[in-house]
Amino acid sequence: MQQDAHEFLNYLLNTVADILQEERKQEKQNGRLPNGNIDSENNNSPDPTWVHEIFQGTLTNETRCLTCETISNKDEDFLDLSVDVEQNTSITHCLRGFSNTETLCSEYKYYCEECRSKQEAHK
């Protein structure tokens, strides 16, 4: 099985984060947190690890309905971004391309909660 450096880094980070979260889960089941405190929270969501603190970001997708002008935001957590890099261009140019506005139309129309139907939109 051949993997490139990007795939290996993703695999490594995800594996380390999974191991750390499993260790925390075991410690919580034993009634102790890593700092020795008794666990008083009953939270089922995974705690962020140092992997998340260092590598995780949040991407906000903003979509604006072209009919009613309503804007909706959706946050997505990520550990990496796929940015198209063209030869002889700057990182700034590549990041601008990543964040360009696209028009959702035809079969890709956006379902607007306000209009309660599929509408053209800018994303």
Image (cartoon, rainbow, N blue to C red):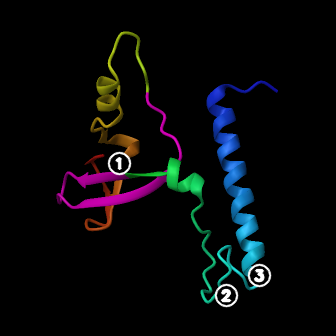
Q: Residues within 10 Å of mark 1 (few under 14, many from 20)?
A: some
Amino acid on which the number 1 mark rests in the picture: Lys
Which of the labelled discs sits on residue 109, or is there none?
1
**Is 74 situated left or right of 26 in this image?**
left
Which of the labelled discs sits on residue 38, or is there none?
2
SS of the residue at dot 1?
loop
SS of the residue at dot 3?
helix
Earlier in the chain: of badge 3 and badge 2, it is 3
Q: Judge by depth and name the residue closer to the eye, 120 or 5.
A: 5
Quadrant of the image for the N terminus? top right
How far apart are labels 3 and 1 at the CA level? 46 Å
Magenta-span inclusion, residue 65 = yes
Magenta-span inclusion, residue 111 = no
Q: Residues within 10 Å of mark 2 (few under 14, many from 20)?
A: few
Q: Which residue range is magenta in the image?
A: 60-83
Task: Say which quarter of the image contains residue 18.
Answer: bottom right
Which of the labelled discs sits on residue 29, or is there none?
3
Residue 94, x across and y down, in percent: 35, 25
Earlier in the chain: of badge 3 and badge 1, it is 3
Residue drawn at x 60%, y 86% is 41
